[in-house]
C-alpha cells in the first residue's frame, strides 16, 4: 500500500494489483457523527445518483454504466467509531479486456467525478423532485431495518447502549431529521461535505499514478479538515436491560459489552483473538456450547467494533430458553477471564484469524474497508502485516484483555 | 491419469479437468497471486431429490422433506472428532450449503491447503449418524427454520415458487419443516447417503495458487474405490400451468415485499442449450426491467419501486423461473406495468443497440466473476452439473444472438405463467 498525501485533507491509498480483472476506485468523505448532519450526509449520495449535468436521469446514468461494460457504481454509508463515512465507488473492467479499445479506466473515473462534482441543479439547489422522492426512499429504508431481525436487534442494542454518545447515532439519521430536509439545506450540506470532510481516496488495480493524481486534483478541492478520534467510555455504567416486543417467531438476544482501550495494533490483534475464541468462529466457545452442546440456537456469535471498543453477542433463541442462553454466554466469557483456554483453542483461533486477515486481500471491498480502518486509527499496517503480529500474543494477554470486559446492555426482542 | 487442459486466451487463464480413478471428477483452476485457495466438494443431490429408485431395488424410496440439508449438517459430525475440530487445526474457514439440486462442502485457507483438503475428502466420505445426534440436530435446524420463517426475503421467494409449481419439489423449503425433519431417522440418512454420495456423481473443484499434481496426490491417498451404484431420481411431471396466481402472507415488515415469478418450461436441460437459455433470458430481463430500462425509470419515478428492485433468472436441469422483485407500496401495479411493457416491446420491437448494450454490461459482470477464487470454483460445480466448461459460460453471453432474443421474448414472459407473491406488513 502506498499512501500519497495529495493536498490538505486529501489522502490517496494506492494498491497496485494485477490479480483482478477489474480496477476499483473510491472516494470517501469522513465526518464526525452528529445529530444535525448525519441524515443530510446520508441523503446526499442518493440525490447525486439521480442525475448530473452530463447524465441527467437514472436512465442515462445506468445506460452509461452499461456502456462501461457493466461497471458497478455504488454509494454507501458506513459508521466506524464516531465517523460517518460517505462513499462513492466504481469497479470496472481493465482496459485490456474491453472489446474495442475502449478506455474504460479514464471513462469510469470521469463518470464518478461527474456524479460527485457536477450535480444537476435548479436555481442553485438540487432538483426538488429528486430530493423529495429520495427523502421518502431513505425513510422507507430506515423503516425497513425492521425486516431483518438479526441486524435490527444489533442496531437497537447500539442505540440503547450508546444513547448519550456519538456512536449511538444511527448512521442514516432519524426519520424526523430526514423529513425536515429541503433541496436548499441539502445543497448547502453537499457544499459543506465537499469542503469540510477528510477525504480518503482508494485505488486498487493498475493505472498510471500521475494521471490518476492529476484527475483527482482537477476534481477534488483541498480543505482544512482535521482528524478526530472516537470517544471511548471507560467508566463502568449501570447495566441496562431492554425488552422490546414484536411479532416474530424467533426471539433475538443481543448483549453489548464494553472493552478496554484499543490503541495500538497489538490491542487490536489481542481483542480479535479473544473474539475468535469467544464467539467469532465455528470452533468458538459460544458455537461449541450454546449451539452444539445445549442445542439452543442456530446462531450465537460475537463481534467486535474496534473503533468504539465494544463487543456484541447476538443470537436467535426461543423465549423459554432466553435465561439458559444468557447464563451460558456469560459463563463462557468467564471461562476466558479465568484463563480456561486450551492450547488447541488458542492455536485454532490464531490460525483462523491469520486466515481471515490474509484472505481479505483477495477481496477489494474488504481491503478497502481495512485501510479505511487503518486511516482512522492512524496506523499503516497491511492485513498480512497485522496477521504477522498474531504470533506475539500469549494466552495471558487474552486473559488480561478479557478482564477489562463488562456487560453494559442486554437487549431482548421477543414475540407478542 | 489423463489430465485435460482447458485454455482461454482472452483471460490468459487455464484449468485442468481430471477423471479420477475413483470415479470423481476433479477440476483444478490455478490462480496466481491470490492469497486464498478455495475447495468445494459437491454432489448432485439437493432438496428436490426426495423420491428415487436405487439400482439394486425396484421400489421407489420416499424420504422426508429437508433431508439433504439435514444430512449436510450431520456429515460434519464424526465418532471421534467433528470436521470443524479438524479444520480448527489447519486454520481453514469451512462451510457447507444445500440448494435445490446440490449439496456442497467447502473451505478456504491461506496455509495448510493440502491438510485441509484431506479433511474435506475424508469427512464427506465418512458418515456417522446416531439417534442421539439426530435429536440434537433437530433443535438446531428447528431454530434455523424459525429464523427463515421470520425472514421476509426468503418467504416472498419461496411463496413465489409455491404459487408457480404444482408438483415439482422446488416448491418445498430446502430445510423442510419442523414436522418433516422430526421424522428423519439414521436409516433415512444412510439410505440417502449411500444413494447420492457416490464419487461418480460428485465433483471436487479447487481454485487458487495451487499445483494440480499435489491435489491429485491427496485424492489418490484419501479416496477409496467404491462400488458406484446408480440412482434414478423421480420428479413428478410438472403441468404447464401455475398453481395459484397470487399468494400473500403477513410478516412484521415495514413495507410490502414482492416477487413476480414467471415459470419456464424446462426438462433435462444441459450443455450449450442450458447456457444459451440462461444468457438470452438474463439479457432480456435486463432489457425489459433492468436499471437502464424505461420501465425501471418509470416505476422508480412514480415511487412504485426503490433501489431494492432486481431481476434474476433461476435455471436448473428440471426447472426455471424468472424472478422480478423488491419493495413496493403497490406490487399489483408493478405487475401490471411489467406485462404492459412486455406487450409493448413485443409489438414495437426491441432495438438491436439496446440488446447489444445490455449484453456488453452482463459480459463485463461475467468476466468480473474471475476476480474471485470462490466464484470460479462455484461456477465449476455448475459446469460439472450442466456439462459445459467455464469459458463456455462467458462465451454464451458474448455470443448471444439478437434473433434468439426475439424468439425468446415472444415465447417466454407469458402472463399466464406468471405469479405474484406478496409479503404484507402485519
Image (cartoon, rainbow, N blue to C red):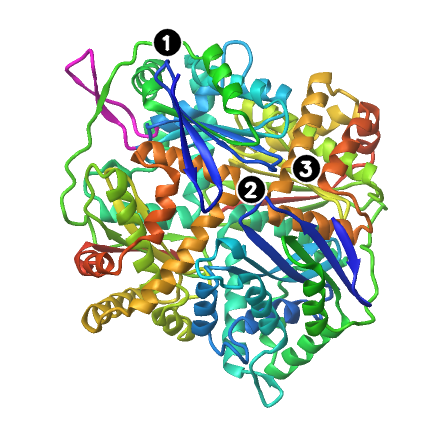
Q: Nearer the viewer, mark 3 or mark 1?
A: 1
Residue located farthest toward the bottom when viewing the structure as drawn? A123
Tell me the quarter of the picture where residue B418 sits.
bottom left
For the question of whether residue B176 can be seen, the reply is no
Q: Nearer the viewer, mark 2 or mark 1?
A: 1
Query: Which residue is rendered at x = 70% and y = 34% of the image?
Result: A275
Query: Is A254 positioned to the left or the right of A237 in the image?
Result: left
Mark-to-mark CA distance, 2 and 3:
29 Å
Looking at the image, is A24 positioned above or below residue A352? Answer: below
Query: CB atoms at circles 2 and 3 under 8 Å apart?
Result: no
Query: Dot 3: within a 10 Å radius of its alpha carbon, few (fewer than 14), some, or many (20 or more) residues?
Result: many
Query: Dot 1: within a 10 Å radius of its alpha carbon, few (fewer than 14), some, or many (20 or more) residues?
Result: few
Mark 1 lies on a secondary structure that is loop
Q: Which residue is mark 2?
A: A252
Q: Which residue is mark 3?
A: A357
Query: Dot 2: within a 10 Å radius of its alpha carbon, few (fewer than 14), some, or many (20 or more) residues?
Result: many
Q: Chain of mark 3?
A: A
Nearest to N terminus: mark 2 or mark 3: 2
Looking at the image, is A260 positioned above or below residue A75? Answer: above
Judged by its main secondary structure, the magenta piece is loop
Residue B108 x %, y %: 56, 31
Q: Chain of mark 1?
A: B
Check chain identity for marks 2 and 1: say if they share one.
Answer: no
Mark-to-mark CA distance, 2 and 1:
47 Å
Q: Which residue is mark 1?
A: B225
Mark 2 lies on a secondary structure that is strand
Residue A92 x %, y %: 53, 57
Residue B391 x %, y %: 39, 42
Residue range corresponding to the magenta coloring: B48-66
State the quadrant of the C terminus of chain B: bottom left
Mark 3 lies on a secondary structure that is helix
Amino acid at each position: 500500500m502506498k499512501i500519497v498525501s495529495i493536498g490538505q485533507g486529501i489522502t490517496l491509498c494506492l494498491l497496485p494489483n494485477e490479480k483482478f480483472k477489474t480496477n476499483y476506485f473510491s472516494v470517501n468523505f469522513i465526518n464526525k457523527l452528529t445529530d444535525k448532519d448525519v441524515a443530510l450526509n446520508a441523503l446526499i449520495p442518493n440525490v447525486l445518483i439521480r442525475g448530473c449535468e452530463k447524465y441527467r436521469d437514472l436512465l442515462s446514468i445506468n445506460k452509461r454504466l452499461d456502456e462501461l461494460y457493466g461497471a458497478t457504481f455504488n454509494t454507501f454509508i458506513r459508521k466506524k467509531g464516531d465517523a460517518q463515512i460517505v462513499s462513492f465507488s466504481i469497479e470496472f473492467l481493465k482496459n485490456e479486456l474491453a472489446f474495442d479499445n475502449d478506455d474504460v479506466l479514464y471513462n469510469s473515473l470521469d463518470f464518478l467525478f461527474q456524479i460527485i462534482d457536477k450535480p444537476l441543479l435548479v436555481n442553485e439547489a438540487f432538483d426538488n423532485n429528486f430530493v423529495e422522492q429520495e427523502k421518502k426512499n431513505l425513510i422507507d429504508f430506515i423503516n425497513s431495518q425492521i425486516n431483518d431481525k438479526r441486524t435490527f436487534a444489533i442496531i437497537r442494542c447500539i442505540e440503547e447502549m450508546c444513547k448519550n454518545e456519538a456512536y449511538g447515532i444511527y448512521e442514516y439519521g432519524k426519520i424526523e431529521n430526514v423529513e425536515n430536509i429541503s433541496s436548499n439545506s441539502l445543497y448547502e450540506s453537499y457544499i459543506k461535505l465537499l469542503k469540510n470532510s477528510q477525504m480518503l481516496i482508494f485505488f486498487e488495480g493498475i493505472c498510471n499514478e500521475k494521471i490518476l493524481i492529476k484527475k483527482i486534483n482537477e476534481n477534488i478541492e483541498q480543505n482544512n479538515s482535521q482528524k478526530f478520534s472516537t470517544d471511548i467510555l471507560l467508566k463502568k455504567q449501570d447495566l441496562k436491560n431492554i425488552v422490546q416486543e414484536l411479532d416474530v417467531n424467533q426471539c433475538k438476544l443481543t448483549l453489548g459489552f464494553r472493552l478496554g482501550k484499543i490503541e495500538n495494533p497489538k490491542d487490536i490483534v489481542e481483542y480479535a483473538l479473544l473474539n475468535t475464541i469467544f464467539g467469532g468462529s465455528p470452533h468458538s466457545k459460544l458455537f461449541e456450547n450454546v449451539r452444539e452442546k445445549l442445542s439452543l440456537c442456530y446462531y450465537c456469535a460475537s463481534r467486535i467494533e474496534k473503533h468504539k471498543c465494544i463487543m456484541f453477542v447476538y443470537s436467535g433463541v426461543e423465549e423459554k430458553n432466553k435465561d439458559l442462553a444468557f447464563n451460558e454466554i456469560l459463563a463462557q466469557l468467564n471461562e476466558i477471564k479465568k484463563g480456561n483456554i486450551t492450547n488447541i483453542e488458542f492455536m485454532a483461533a490464531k490460525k483462523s484469524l491469520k486466515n481471515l486477515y490474509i484472505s481479505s486481500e483477495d477481496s477489494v471491498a474488504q481491503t478497502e474497508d481495512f485501510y479505511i480502518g487503518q486511516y482512522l486509527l492512524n496506523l499503516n499496517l497491511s492485513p498480512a502485516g497485522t496477521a504477522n503480529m498474531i504470533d506475539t500474543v500469549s494466552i495471558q494477554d487474552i486473559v488480561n484483555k478479557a478482564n477489562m470486559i463488562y456487560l453494559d446492555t442486554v437487549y431482548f426482542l421477543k414475540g407478542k | 491419469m489423463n489430465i485435460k487442459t482447458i485454455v482461454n486466451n482472452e483471460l490468459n487463464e487455464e484449468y485442468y479437468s481430471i477423471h479420477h480413478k475413483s470415479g470423481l471428477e476433479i477440476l483444478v483452476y490455478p490462480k496466481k497471486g491470490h492469497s486464498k485457495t478455495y475447495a468445494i466438494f459437491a454432489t448432485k443431490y439437493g432438496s428436490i431429490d426426495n423420491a428415487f429408485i436405487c439400482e439394486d431395488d425396484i421400489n421407489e424410496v420416499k424420504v422426508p422433506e429437508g433431508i439433504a440439508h439435514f444430512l449436510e449438517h450431520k456429515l460434519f459430525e464424526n465418532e471421534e472428532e467433528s470436521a470443524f475440530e479438524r479444520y480448527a487445526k489447519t486454520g481453514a474457514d469451512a462451510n457447507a450449503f444445500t440448494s435445490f439440486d446440490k449439496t456442497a462442502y467447502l473451505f478456504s485457507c491461506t496455509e495448510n491447503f493440502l491438510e485441509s483438503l484431506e479433511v474435506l475428502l475424508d469427512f464427506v466420505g465418512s458418515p456417522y449418524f446416531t439417534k442421539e445426534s439426530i435429536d440434537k440436530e433437530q433443535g438446531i435446524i428447528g431454530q434455523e427454520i424459525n429464523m427463515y420463517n421470520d425472514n421476509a426475503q426468503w418467504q416472498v421467494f419461496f411463496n413465489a415458487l409455491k404459487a408457480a409449481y404444482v408438483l415439482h419439489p422446488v416448491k418445498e423449503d430446502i430445510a423442510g419443516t419442523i414436522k418433516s425433519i422430526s421424522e428423519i431417522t439414521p436409516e433415512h440418512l444412510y439410505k440417502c447417503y449411500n444413494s447420492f454420495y457416490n464419487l461418480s456423481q460428485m465433483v471436487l473443484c479447487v481454485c487458487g495458487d495451487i499445483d494440480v499434481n499435489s491435489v491429485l496426490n491427496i485424492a489418490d491417498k484419501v479416496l477409496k474405490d467404491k462400488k458406484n451404484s446408480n440412482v434414478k431420481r423421480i420428479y413428478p411431471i410438472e403441468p404447464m400451468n401455475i398453481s395459484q396466481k397470487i399468494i400473500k402472507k403477513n410478516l412484521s415488515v415495514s413495507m410490502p415485499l414482492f416477487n413476480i415469478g414467471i415459470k419456464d418450461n424446462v426438462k433435462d436441460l444441459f450443455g450449450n442449450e442450458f447456457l444459451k437459455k440462461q444468457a438470452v433470458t438474463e439479457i432480456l430481463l435486463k432489457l425489459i426491467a433492468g436499471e437502464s430500462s424505461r420501465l425501471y425509470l418509470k416505476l422508480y419515478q412514480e415511487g412504485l419501486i426503490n433501489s431494492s428492485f432486481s431481476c434474476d433468472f433461476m435455471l436448473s436441469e428440471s426447472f426455471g423461473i424468472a424472478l422480478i422483485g423488491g419493495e413496493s407500496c403497490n406490487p399489483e401495479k408493478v405487475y401490471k406495468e411489467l406485462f404492459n411493457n412486455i406487450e409493448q416491446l413485443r409489438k414495437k420491437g426491441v432495438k438491436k443497440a439496446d440488446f447489444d448494450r445490455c449484453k456488453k454490461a452482463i459480459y463485463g459482470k461475467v468476466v468480473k466473476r474471475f476476480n474471485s477464487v470462490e466464484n470460479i470454483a462455484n461456477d465449476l460445480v455448475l459446469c460439472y452439473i450442466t456439462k459445459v466448461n467455464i469459458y463456455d459460460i462467458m462465451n454464451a453471453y458474448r455470443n448471444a444472438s439478437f434473433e434468439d432474443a426475439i424468439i425468446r421474448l415472444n415465447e417466454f414472459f407469458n402472463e399466464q405463467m406468471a405469479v405474484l407473491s406478496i409479503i404484507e406488513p402485519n
